[in-house]
Image: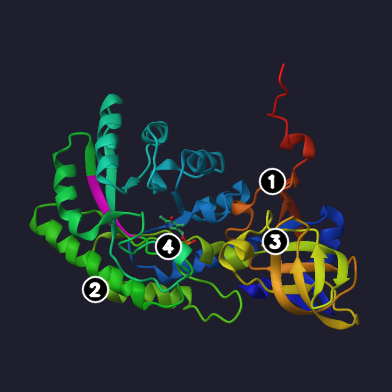
């Protein structure tokens, strides 16, 4: 998907828009998304799944900007949400509740009520206690809650430990060995309706074998449920497909879907998927300006105007993001620690990067469309960056840069 961002005459472009001009018009730091890249990703799923009854539920937490949700809603997507707030975003963006699945280990009663009132497709229930609570809340509202159990298949996703979710020791889902008994309990609860099963084993997976291993275990359970008289309408295989940040070689969306379909062996239940990162990660980048170059005794530093509050992944997971100049100039090539202005040693964007830059140079930090803006904060009283959507030669400001006044508007002095 990086082809939507390219050099022409030593200038970096997003679709048909010069990113230098965009940075001058909208300021930095600034997140930039490509509508064509977003659409292409979704269409790759739709095409691969042609002929299979399916619903692609975009995982909102990867990037919840309303414009992005709206693009996916118009393409026919459903949504995977993890909070009541995300449900409200989906509805505000023109998504329909009937295509929403609700994941997460800590759903509050208020969130359950909101989702029941809206009429979502399914609650992905993650514990016995949640099952009981949901039954009670639905009963109080005179409603029946559609549910699936998120089963933990205990497979190793072979990804970063912070984003591995399908192992026994993780907090997610119900234990594989408990699932059958919990489904039988759910069948006995009057205000629940069993509609499916789901699993989500982790994020940024670059191999297919863990997905296949999870499906094989899920299917054993689906058969055991059928033998117990519990028939499911859908199988939800979660998200987690990885993208290329640096030198990873993740499978294509087509290869991923083919592997899932192979493992599913012609099952007729509707197939639900919850991709996040793979739909948005490489459809976005972040523009930043070099404030200072600082030549230290051991290392050179490029100090940018973006920081860990704008992009947390390097500090959190030691994640790699490619960094490129918006204009290829003949500045001296040097090796830099690329850092932000925040008072934390963990505030870095990249280590030991070879860059031909000067003070005030404009840069692009690539692959920031997923878990970039959505994990951003106001640490150091830094306003969140602007977000811009490029569409051909058109540019839309899809989120204004925050103002300092907004940051403390809800705070009060002692009276
Ligand atoms: C985060 C999450 C996803 C999306 O994961 P990606 O790695 O971004 O595809 C899907 N389902 C659930 C339950 C999640 O928590």
Residue found 44% across the figure and 75% down from its top = 254
Q: Nearer the viewer, mark 4 or mark 3?
A: 3
**In contact (CB < 8 Å): disc 1 and disc 3:** no
Q: Rate crowding at label 1 as few (under 14), some (14 to 19) or many (20 or more) other CA atoms within 10 Å.
A: some
Q: Which labelled disc corresponds to residue 378?
A: 1
Q: Which residue is mark 4?
A: 239
In three-dimensional space, the C-alpha distance between marks 4 and 1, rounded to whole angstroms, equals 28 Å
**In contact (CB < 8 Å): disc 4 and disc 1:** no
Quarter of the image containing the C terminus?
Answer: top right
Q: Which labelled disc corresponds to residue 265?
A: 2
Q: Which quarter of the figure has residue 407?
A: top right
Work out whether 116 lies above or below 260: above
Q: Rate crowding at label 4 as few (under 14), some (14 to 19) or many (20 or more) other CA atoms within 10 Å.
A: many
Of pointers 3 and 2, the one earlier in the residue sequence = 2
Q: Rate crowding at label 2 as few (under 14), some (14 to 19) or many (20 or more) other CA atoms within 10 Å.
A: few
Of pointers 4 and 1, the one earlier in the residue sequence = 4
Provide the residue span drawn in magenta: 194-199
Is 37 in the magenta? no
Residue 338, position in %: x, y? 75, 70
In three-dimensional space, the C-alpha distance between marks 4 and 3, rounded to whole angstroms, equals 29 Å
In three-dimensional space, the C-alpha distance between marks 2 and 1, rounded to whole angstroms, equals 48 Å
Is 197 in the magenta? yes
């Amino acid at each position: 998907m990086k082809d939507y961002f390219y050099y022409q005459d030593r200038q970096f472009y997003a679709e048909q828009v010069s990113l230098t001009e965009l940075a001058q018009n909208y300021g930095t730091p600034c997140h930039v998304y490509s509508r064509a890249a977003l659409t292409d990703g979704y269409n790759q799923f739709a095409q691969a799944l042609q002929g299979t009854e399916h619903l692609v539920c975009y995982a909102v937490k990867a990037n919840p900007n309303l414009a992005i949700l709206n693009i996916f809603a118009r393409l026919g997507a459903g949504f995977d949400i993890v909070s009541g707030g995300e449900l409200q975003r989906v509805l505000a963006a023109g998504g329909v509740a009937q295509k929403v699945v609700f994941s997460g280990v800590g759903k509050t009663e208020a969130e359950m009520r909101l989702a029941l009132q809206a009429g979502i497709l399914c609650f992905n229930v993650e514990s016995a206690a949640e099952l009981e609570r949901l039954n009670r809340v639905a009963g109080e509202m005179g409603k029946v809650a559609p549910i699936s159990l998120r089963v933990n298949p205990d497979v190793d996703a072979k990804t970063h430990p912070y984003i591995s979710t399908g192992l026994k020791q993780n907090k997610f889902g119900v234990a594989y060995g408990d699932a059958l008994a919990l489904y039988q309990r759910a069948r006995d609860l009057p205000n629940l309706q069993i509609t499916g099963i789901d699993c989500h084993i982790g994020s940024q997976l670059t191999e297919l074998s863990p997905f296949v291993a999870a499906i094989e275990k899920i299917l054993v359970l689906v058969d055991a449920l059928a033998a117990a008289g519990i028939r499911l309408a859908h199988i939800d295989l979660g998200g987690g497909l990885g993208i290329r940040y640096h030198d990873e070689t993740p499978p294509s969306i087509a290869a991923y879907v083919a592997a899932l379909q192979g493992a599913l062996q012609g099952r007729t239940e509707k197939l639900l998927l919850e991709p996040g990162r793979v739909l948005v990660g490489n459809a976005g980048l972040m523009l930043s300006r070099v404030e200072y170059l600082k030549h230290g005794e051991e290392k050179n530093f490029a100090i940018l105007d973006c920081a860990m509050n704008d992009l947390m992944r390097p500090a959190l997971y030691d994640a790699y993001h490619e960094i490129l100049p918006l204009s290829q100039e003949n500045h001296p090539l040097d090796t830099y620690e690329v850092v932000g202005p925040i008072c934390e040693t963990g505030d870095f964007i990249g280590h030991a990067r070879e860059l031909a830059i000067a003070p005030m140079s404009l840069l692009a930090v690539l692959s920031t469309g997923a878990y970039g803006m959505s994990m951003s904060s106001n640490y150091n009283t830094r306003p969140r960056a602007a977000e811009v959507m490029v569409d051909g030669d058109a540019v839309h400001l899809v989120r204004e840069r925050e103002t300092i006044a907004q940051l403390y508007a809800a705070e009060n002095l002692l009276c």
